Amino acid sequence: MKHLEENWLTTGELDLEMKQYQLFAYLQHVSKNFEADKLYPHLEELKNQKDILSSFLFQVRHFHQTAEQELSGMDISKHKLLYTSALAQTDASKKLEEIATFALPYIEQNFTYASTKSDEYLATIDFEPIGVLPTYIKEGYAFLYHDTLSQVDIFKYSIRTVQYEAAAPLEVSFLGRKVIRLSESFSNLKLELTKNFRDLPNPAAFLLRPMRMLPTQETLLPLFKKRLFRGVCEFS
């Protein structure tokens, strides 16, 4: 199982053994990817499931302490419990709680493992400005340089002030790839971009250099974006 549906807890038959099978099949696939240094998108999926299950069980405990209603289900999109009278859905509510209680420690364990690896790999990406930075650096260029390949991936970035939590504050667009020769410099590459793209006459530019080889789509690019965002914020 490559992905765990967001509402897997409440979808289908509420059978503990079946839910355990679904969970373990997913985590087996996830574990193989993590061992191969392929962290995304499963790291984000695990965080989402961890938050959903933690919120669910917190509300269950609160319900047991304060309410005289019976838990009947869960609204996944709003992370809220659904209640009926105390006489209805007794078995269903108990099964939901049992499944969530069983699943959460496994979700947390795998999330912690992958999160630790992500932090370790993030720390191996060097970050430095190219030339003198302008006053405004929320837009500019980012160079992802691969030493072993002597090539650079060129990106344009923009950091926005978001009005709602779901929006991504960093926008990145890929401009191209270029082989860097010994006679060339990143400062010259910045000047070249300034001539070709007139919308940024005095751009900020940053060099990101990963110190180890990582799977591009599943790890390097997500960490590149995270390191870029953090680095620009540090210089702001």
Image (cartoon, rainbow, N blue to C red):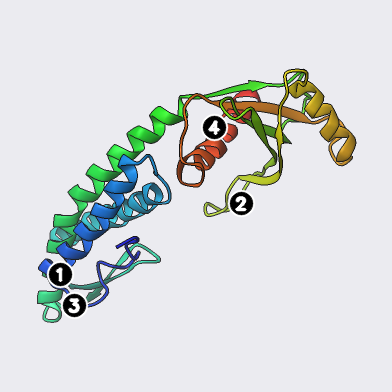
Tag 3 residue = 13
Q: Position of residue 131 (x, y in %)?
A: 76, 18
Tag 4 residue = 227
Determine crowd level at label 3: few under 14, some 14-19, many 20+ residues with C-alpha closer than 10 A.
few
> How far, Cα to Cα, is label 2 from label 1?
41 Å
Residue type at the position of mark 1: Met
> How far, Cα to Cα, is label 1 from label 4?
40 Å
- Choose between 73 and 9: the one closer to the eye: 9
Q: Which tag is nearer the camera, tag 1 or tag 3?
A: 1
Quadrant for the N terminus in the image? bottom left
Q: Could you tell me which secondary element the residue under label 4 belongs to?
A: helix
Q: Residue at x 61, y 51 (%)?
A: 163
Q: Residue at x 33, y 33 (%)?
A: 116
Sequence-wise, which precedes: disc 2 or disc 1? 1
Sequence-wise, which precedes: disc 3 or disc 2? 3
Residue type at the position of mark 2: Gln
> How far, Cα to Cα, is label 3 from label 4?
42 Å
Residue type at the position of mark 3: Glu
* Image marks 1 and 3: residues in contact by CB distance under 8 Å: yes
Q: Could you tell me which secondary element the residue under label 3 belongs to?
A: loop
- Choose between 114 and 164: the one closer to the eye: 114
Determine crowd level at label 2: few under 14, some 14-19, many 20+ residues with C-alpha closer than 10 A.
few
> How far, Cα to Cα, is label 1 from label 3?
8 Å
Sequence-wise, which precedes: disc 1 or disc 3? 3
Q: Is residue 195 visible?
A: yes
Q: Position of residue 11 (x, y in %)?
A: 27, 74
Tag 1 residue = 18
> Residue 163 — which label?
2
Sequence-wise, which precedes: disc 1 or disc 4? 1
Q: Could you tell me which secondary element the residue under label 1 belongs to?
A: helix
